[in-house]
């Protein structure tokens, strides 16, 4: 069975494309590439068609993850039935997704298990912001992969 996972942030240029790329690499490293469909989107429409932020591309490349081929898109109504799991980077996007789900079948959740911790938007920060976000996404992605593989095994 193929599991579908959608990562979501505000504009789909910093956090969610990084999460998509990192999760894809974790799935590959685990030898489970054929078991997952992975994508990312934003709740806003500002950056539709744009590539990821150059700083996200740079931090991903630093860790051997290529996200250069991604293009920003906005979450669509179909996504709530198309994806098994929709993963929000923060509570604001989680609230937005829950209000738009309209009875869709997707399980909507935060990336990080800790209810008081979110993946902050690094857009207005410096290089350290993107490094910190990468580390949070990698740790959260590892836990998510473990949860999903245990759940569907």
Image: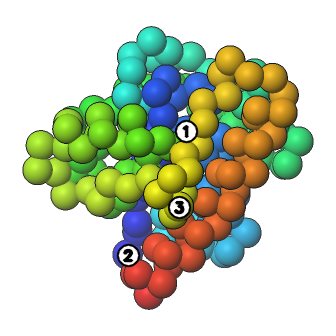
For mark 1, what is the residue?
16
Element carrying mark 2: loop
Disc nearer the start of the sequence (1/3):
1
Left or right of 69 on screen, residue 60: right
Q: Quadrant of the C terminus?
A: bottom left
Q: Disc 3 vs disc 2: which is toward the camera?
A: 3
> Residue 62: percent from the left, percent from the top?
88, 42
**In this view of the protein, can residue 111 be seen by the observer?**
no
In the drawing, what numbered circle is on residue 130?
Answer: none
**In this view of the protein, can residue 149 be seen by the observer?**
yes
Asked if the residue under mark 3 is in contact with the one under mark 1, i.e. CB atoms within 8 Å, the reply is no
CA–CA distance in space, label 1 to label 2 = 24 Å
Question: Quadrant of the rendered structure where residue 109 is?
Answer: bottom left
Is the residue 112 above or below the residue 102 in the image?
below
CA–CA distance in space, label 3 to label 2 = 28 Å
Q: Residue at x 59, y 69 (%)?
A: 143
For mark 2, what is the residue?
1
In the drawing, what numbered circle is on residue 114?
Answer: 3
Q: Residues within 10 Å of mark 1 (few under 14, many from 20)?
A: many
């Amino acid at each position: 069975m193929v599991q579908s996972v959608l990562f979501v942030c505000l504009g789909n240029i910093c956090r969610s494309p990084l999460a998509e790329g990192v999760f894809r690499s974790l799935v590959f490293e685990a030898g489970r590439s054929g078991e997952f469909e992975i994508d990312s989107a934003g709740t806003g429409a500002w950056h539709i068609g744009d590539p990821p932020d150059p700083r996200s591309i740079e931090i991903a490349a630093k860790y051997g993850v290529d996200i250069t081929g991604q293009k920003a898109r906005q979450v669509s109504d179909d996504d709530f039935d198309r994806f098994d799991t929709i993963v929000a980077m923060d509570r604001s996007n989680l609230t937005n997704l829950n209000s738009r789900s309209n009875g869709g079948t997707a399980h909507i959740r935060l990336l990080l298990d800790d209810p008081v911790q979110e993946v902050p938007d690094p857009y207005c920060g410096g290089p350290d912001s993107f490094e910190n976000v990468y580390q949070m996404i990698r740790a959260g992605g590892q836990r998510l992969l473990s949860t999903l593989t245990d759940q569907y095994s």
